[in-house]
């Protein structure tokens, strides 16, 4: 048994060595010459998203804890990028993978999971977690449970985590220690890793978490009421949760911003024009919040750098965020936010 686990860890480590680190893209704003935004492009991972890091960490965590063995069926409650990435690593190790997903999950997502050999088990949204645990018991498998283990599966002190990578890549920039790092929260794993690393290294950098509509994290950050729930799911895939997740650690977050969904979608349209590429909706949420922080810095006469993430590519969302009919059906008015973004780009000022 130990021999197989050691071989599995070596396979994952070899896969990591074959993958170059993700790029840190500089987005210069003409009206803000003394404040620069950098975007860490997580869309270039083999499975196309930030969740590739999480999936790798969860597999290593499960292997080193003795929870995953030869022929263990891997179960996860996810219909999105985490399931795609976990299916990739399960295939890499020759393990069966089952994604427990809501019945209304799009065929496109099911196809992505199936591409890496995963199977989908469709249930009502309210049954995701209970059914995942039931399946794990019935199949003698392992429930990854990303929303519990995301904050502890990654070594936040270093070991090539995303925070260490960001600060290493910033080393030769004019302002190498960012004033702010801005991320969203789905599981809370990324914010926990970055927040802990900042404190461990004693950097003055502050961490801001951007939260979309219909997510409880923003309210939880302010009132610490873990019982709050949201009845409407987030439109911004990959971030925002209807319940407080165990892996979200509010005490390491310096500030939170709640971003309207129309602002998130408007921002990905804005980035397409000024960055020359399509990004997913969570990137729009992050960047909209980052722009507000930059405008505040500009107003105070500060110079510095702000870092955020490109969580995944926008090509995954052509039927939604880049589809005017979908936007209209969701009753999202993008124009006020597009005007605000362009005004900030041209003047460095934030219109309220």
Image: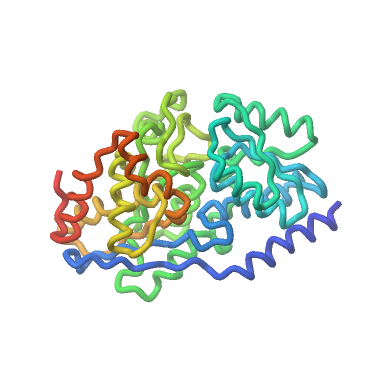
State the residue at coordinates (68%, 54%). 89
Residue 258 in view of the camera: no
Q: Nearer the viewer, residue 227 or 318?
A: 318
Image location of residue 215, percent across then percent down: 40, 33
Residue at (19% x, 67% y) in the render: 30
Q: Quick one: 89 or 270, which is closer to the camera?
A: 270
Is 179 drawn above or below residue 253 in the view shown?
Answer: below
Q: Position of residue 237 (x, y in %)?
A: 45, 42
Query: At which x and y percent is residue 59?
Result: 67, 51
Q: Residue furthest front?
A: 325
Number of numbered discs overlaid on the protein picture: 0
- Residue 286 position in % (x across, y down): 35, 50
Using residue 143 as the reference point, say whether residue 174 is left or right of it. Answer: left
Pick the quarter of the image with the C terminus.
top left
Q: Is residue 137 above or below residue 66?
A: above
As displayed, is residue 198 above or below residue 185?
A: below
Q: Is residue 46 left or right of residue 232?
A: right
- Horizontally, residue 112 falls left or right of residue 236, namely right
Q: Residue at x 20, y 56 (%)?
A: 297
| Side of 227 where 139 appears, left or right | right
Closer to the camera in the image, 312 or 191:
312
Q: Nearer the viewer, residue 55 or 222?
A: 55
For residue 108, say whether it is visible: yes
Q: How is the image coloured?
A: rainbow
């Amino acid at each position: 048994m130990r021999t197989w686990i050691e071989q599995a860890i070596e396979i994952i480590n070899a896969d990591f060595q074959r993958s170059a680190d993700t790029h840190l893209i500089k987005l210069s704003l003409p009206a803000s010459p003394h404040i620069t935004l950098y975007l860490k492009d997580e869309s270039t991972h083999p499975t196309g998203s930030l969740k590739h890091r999480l999936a790798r960490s969860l597999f290593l965590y499960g292997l080193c804890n003795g929870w995953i063995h030869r022929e263990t069926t891997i179960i996860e409650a996810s219909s999105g990028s985490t399931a795609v990435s976990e299916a990739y690593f399960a295939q890499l190790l020759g393990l069966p993978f089952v994604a427990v997903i809501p019945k209304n999950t799009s065929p496109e997502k099911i196809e992505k999971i199936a591409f890496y050999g995963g199977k989908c088990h469709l249930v009502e949204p309210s049954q995701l977690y209970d059914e995942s645990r039931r399946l794990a018991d019935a199949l003698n498998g392992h429930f990854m449970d990303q929303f519990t283990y995301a904050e502890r599966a990654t070594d936040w002190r270093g070991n090539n985590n995303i925070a260490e990578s960001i600060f290493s890549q910033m080393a030769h920039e004019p302002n190498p220690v960012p004033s702010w790092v801005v991320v969203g929260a789905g599981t809370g794993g990324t914010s926990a890793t970055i927040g802990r690393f900042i404190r461990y290294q004693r950097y003055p950098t502050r961490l801001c978490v951007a939260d979309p509509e219909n997510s409880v994290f923003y309210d939880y950050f302010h009132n610490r009421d873990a019982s709050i729930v949201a009845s409407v799911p987030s439109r911004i895939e990959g971030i925002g949760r209807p319940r407080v997740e165990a892996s979200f650690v509010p005490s390491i977050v310096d500030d939170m911003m709640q971003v309207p969904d129309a602002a998130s979608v408007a921002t990905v349209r804005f980035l397409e024009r000024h960055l020359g590429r399509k990004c997913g909706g969570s990137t729009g949420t992050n960047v909209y919040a980052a722009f507000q922080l930059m405008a505040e810095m500009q107003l105070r006469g500060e110079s510095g750098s702000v870092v955020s993430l490109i969580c995944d590519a926008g090509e995954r969302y052509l039927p939604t965020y880049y589809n005017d009919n979908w936007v209209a059906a969701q009753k999202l008015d993008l124009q006020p936010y597009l005007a605000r973004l362009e005004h900030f780009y041209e003047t460095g000022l934030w219109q309220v």
